[in-house]
Structures are given as C-alpha cells and as structure tokens.
C-alpha cells in the first residue's frame, strides 16, 4: 500500500486510475474493485462522491432510521422506509452528464411555501411512488438509479424502517446527571446530552438480502463518515448485516469524521470512536482507519487504538482547504485510491 497522496491527482505510472474528464479518476477494467459503503446522510454522500471517481462498482448500504422532516412524514403516512438518505445516496452516484445532473437536481429539489408539499423533496415523493407502483423497494431504487445513470447501486440496510433508541446523560439540561432513554433518530441526533449506548427497534429487523450479498461479494467495505450514533453505528446493530460484515473476506476501512468532537460525539476524541465501535461490534476487525490530520490530536494513541482493531492508521488530508468540516471529493478520492489500489 502506498502512502497518502497530498498533492494533485496524477495518472498512475503503474497503469492505475488516471484523472479523466470532469475530474474523474478513470480506472482500467481490471481495477474495477467492488466497494460497499455504509452510512447515511451527508457523510455517506461524501464517500460516494469520492468512490464514484474510482470505480463504477459501488454499492451504498443506507440507514433507514430517519424519522424527521420529509422522510419522517412519508414514513408515518405510508408505512415505508424513510427515503431521504436513499435519495441522497442516489444523487451522489449520478452520472457526469447533463442528463444525470438535471435529474439529480430534480431529485434534490425541495418544495417551499406553506402548503402540504412544504419541505418535501421531490425525489422522496418519486421514490415512494415507485415503491407503491412496483411493490418492490429494491426495484424502485434501481429504477431511479437507471434514470440518473448512477455509477453504482443503492440499497437499504434493512427491509423495514428502524427506530433508534439511546441512553443519554443530560438530555434535559436542567438535570445534567440524569440518564434517560430517548427514542427516534431526530431526537437522539439533536439531544444536548451525551450518548451512553445505542440500540434499534425491532432488535432483529428483516434483512435486505441484496445488501448482505453485496457485503459478501465486496473487495472493500467502507464505514463512515457520518453522524456516529445515528448513521454509522446502526449498521452494526442489525444482526444479519453485522454477521455479514464480520464474515466477509473484504478488507474494511473506517473513514473517521472530520470533526470527531461535534454533535452526537461532543467531547469525543478520535480514539473514542474506535472504542465505541469495538464495544458495539466486538467481533468486527478493520484493516485501515483513515483520518484527516485535523482529527488527530495524539497520533500514537490513535494508532494504538487502530491496531487494537487490527487496522493500520492512514493520515491524509481529505477536507476542503479553508473549510475543515467539509470533505473534498478529489482529496478523499485520492486518499481512498492510495489505500484501495
């Protein structure tokens, strides 16, 4: 494995990915590795925006616990999977063409005003419509992927919607030492308290079989970045998916958040993320932990925590220059290319 890339992307002298049109790293057919990326929301979108520059063989496995906003309304009204994170993943994989970009923008369009459609993303409505017409969740997502010319596939992490449950200390700021059980992704994600533990309902949800098969067939599995307790960790709480992740021959990479001590993980260090992962998935080992320099306070301590999970620590700049909280797709693609090969 080569060291981290810190300069501009260049064609590989060894015949690997080269910088193609529209900034795409164009792999040769022999380098079309199958990469599975797990997460949700903006974090998963950042990973997919980078991976699509490296390979057309990407499978996104997306959290289905969202209960807020447009997704939450559609989930409650139609008893379906929350479509929002699935929509964002599809948009991130869209083809680099006028057609693809136009349909991506259509999918992402959100209605304004104060009527019944206020706040709904058009893509959420389209996805739920296809689910009703086809009676097939995966088939509907695949059809939207074809419309976008998506460079990969998007699948849910379970075949039924999930509810996040968390034990949180200080959820009520007036009683900072009190530990309460909080239900729902939106409430957990927005809590001012400290998350002590995380769970899901149902505890053994119906699995998405194509997602399990994708993990089994993968060359690499990428976890993160994203909201740690509500987008990343839930994948490890779905028993069938957790078993698939521990049993796959694929190599596994954890992409740490750029801001490890914000939101759900306020006051966390990067090492605390790894400790949380080990506590919730004791049988899961990693091969690589990828971290931006801004997330590394004590390199020796983080390297030791990574080694406890069987992983090598790779430190490489992946944030937008001047905006350290946002991933740069080209920088992240370069870092992933150097690891994945």
Image (spheres, rainbow, N blue to C red):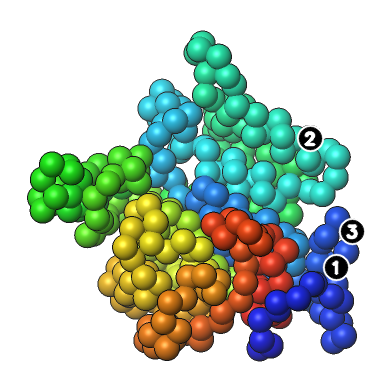
Q: Tell me which corner region of the image, top left, top right, bottom left or bottom right, holds residue 104.
A: top right
Residue lying at 78% horizontally and 40% vertically, measured from the top left: 101
Q: Which residue is mark 1?
A: 19
Q: Earlier in the sequence, mark 3 or mark 2?
A: 3
Between 20 and 316, the one nearer to me in the picture: 316
Residue depth check, mark 2 versus mark 1: number of the one nearer the observer: 1
Residue name at image x 74 percent, y 54 percent:
151
3D distance between C-alphas at marks 2 and 1 = 24 Å
Q: Position of residue 59 (x, y in %)?
A: 62, 59
For residue 102, the mark is 2
Q: In the rendered view of the protein, which quadrant contains the N terminus?
A: bottom right
Q: What is the secondary structure assignment of the residue under circle 3?
A: helix
* Residue picked out by circle 3: 21
Residue 159: percent from left, percent from top? 44, 46
Q: Secondary structure at mark 2?
A: helix
- Up the image or down, 164 lies above or below 130; here it is below
């Amino acid at each position: 494995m080569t060291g981290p890339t810190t300069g501009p992307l260049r064609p590989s002298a060894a015949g690997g990915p080269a910088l193609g049109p529209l900034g795409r790293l164009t792999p040769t057919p022999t380098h079309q590795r199958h990469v599975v990326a797990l997460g949700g929301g903006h974090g998963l979108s950042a990973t997919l925006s980078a991976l699509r520059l490296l390979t057309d063989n990407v499978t996104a496995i997306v959290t289905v616990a969202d209960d807020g906003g447009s997704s939450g309304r559609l989930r409650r009204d139609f008893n379906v999977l929350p479509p929002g994170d699935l929509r964002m993943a599809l948009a991130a994989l869209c083809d680099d063409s006028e057609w693809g970009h136009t349909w991506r923008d259509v999918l992402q369009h959100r209605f304004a005003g104060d009527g019944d459609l206020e706040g709904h993303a058009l893509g959420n409505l389209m996805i739920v419509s296809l689910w009703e017409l086809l009676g097939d969740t995966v088939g509907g997502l695949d059809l939207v992927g074809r419309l976008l010319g998506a460079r990969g596939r998007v699948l849910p992490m379970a075949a039924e919607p999930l509810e996040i449950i968390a034990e949180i200390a200080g959820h009520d700021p007036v009683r900072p030492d009190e530990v309460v059980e909080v239900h729902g992704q939106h409430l957990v994600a927005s809590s001012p308290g400290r998350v002590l533990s995380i769970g899901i309902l149902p505890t053994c949800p119906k699995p998405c079989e194509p997602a399990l098969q994708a993990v089994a067939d993968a060359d690499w599995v990428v976890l993160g970045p994203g909201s740690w307790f509500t987008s990343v960790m839930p994948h490890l709480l779905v028993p069938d998916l957790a078993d698939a992740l521990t049993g796959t021959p694929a190599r596994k990479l954890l992409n740490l958040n750029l801001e490890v001590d914000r939101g759900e993980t306020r006051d966390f260090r990067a090492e605390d993320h790894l400790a949380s992962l080990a506590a919730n998935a004791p049988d899961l080992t990693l091969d690589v932990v990828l971290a931006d320099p801004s997330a590394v306070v004590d390199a020796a301590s983080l390297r030791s925590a990574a080694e406890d999970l069987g992983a090598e620590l790779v430190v490489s700049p992946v944030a937008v220059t001047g905006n350290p909280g946002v991933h740069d797709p080209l920088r992240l693609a370069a870092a992933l290319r150097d690891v994945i090969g």
